[in-house]
Amino acid sequence: MGDRFLKRYSYTVIANDFMLAGKGASSIKSNLKSLGINASIIRKTAIISYEAEINIAIHSYGGKIHCDIYENKIVIICEDIGPGISDVDMAFTEGFSTATERVRELGFGAGMGLPNIKKYSDRLEIKTDSSGTKITVTVCL
Ligand SMILES: Nc1ncnc2c1ncn2[C@@H]1O[C@H](COP(=O)(O)OP(=O)(O)OP(=O)(O)O)[C@@H](O)[C@H]1O
Ligand SMILES: [Mg+2]
């Protein structure tokens, strides 16, 4: 199978909107189901999109997630506006979190999102600075 591009699903993530956060990931999940994609690939993609979506809602000023389907892979592109991640190695360390008390009360802030995104990806690229963060994650089919 080649790497021909097939389809893009996109959604907007609004900062601090905890009613909406997670809806994008679940709509990606149902779209992938309707494409007949393998269940373990759907599970990995859903975890990656969910964690990225929550991170944008909690830690950024807002952003977008694109889920690109190719013949041989799924690429999840997560882009947000500021403040960026000042220490990327630290951010990928299990248990590290800068989440506020208020956000922790909602059940977030275990410091497991980025480690899990990495764990379920076949490839991960991150670009971050004080104007925003872009994480590109590939899951091979
Ligand atoms: N999009 C982002 N913009 C700015 N900082 C981020 C972003 N994503 C993650 N971070 C930083 O990296 C840290 C680790 O992220 P990670 O997702 O692993 O944990 P968390 O979001 O704090 O908790 P959890 O994901 O377990 O609810 C965050 O606490 C935050 O400091
Ligand atoms: Mg997180």
Image (cartoon, rainbow, N blue to C red):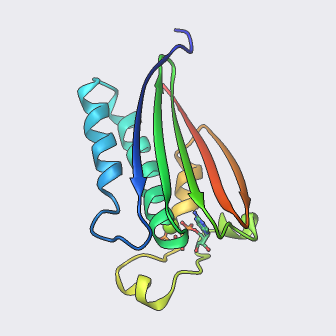
Left or right, 46 with reference to 61: left
User: Residue at horizontal 67%, vertical 66%?
Assistant: 84
Question: Between 96 and 4, which is closer to the camera in this rendering?
Answer: 4
Residue 69 position (above or below residue 119):
above
x, y percentage for residue 9? 39, 35
Left or right, 65 with reference to 137: left
x, y percentage for residue 58? 47, 72
Q: Quadrant of residue 124?
A: top right
User: Residue at horizontal 50%, vertical 57%?
Assistant: 63
User: Residue at horizontal 66%, vertical 63%?
Assistant: 92
Question: Between 117 and 34, which is closer to the camera in this rendering?
Answer: 34
Count numbered badges in the picture. Answer: 0
User: Residue at horizontal 45%, vertical 67%?
Assistant: 57
- Which residue, as the protein is rendered here, is positioned at the far top? 1
x, y percentage for residue 68? 48, 31
Residue 74 position (above or below residue 120):
above
Q: Quadrant of residue 10?
A: top left
- Which residue, as the protein is rendered here, is positioned at the far bottom? 101
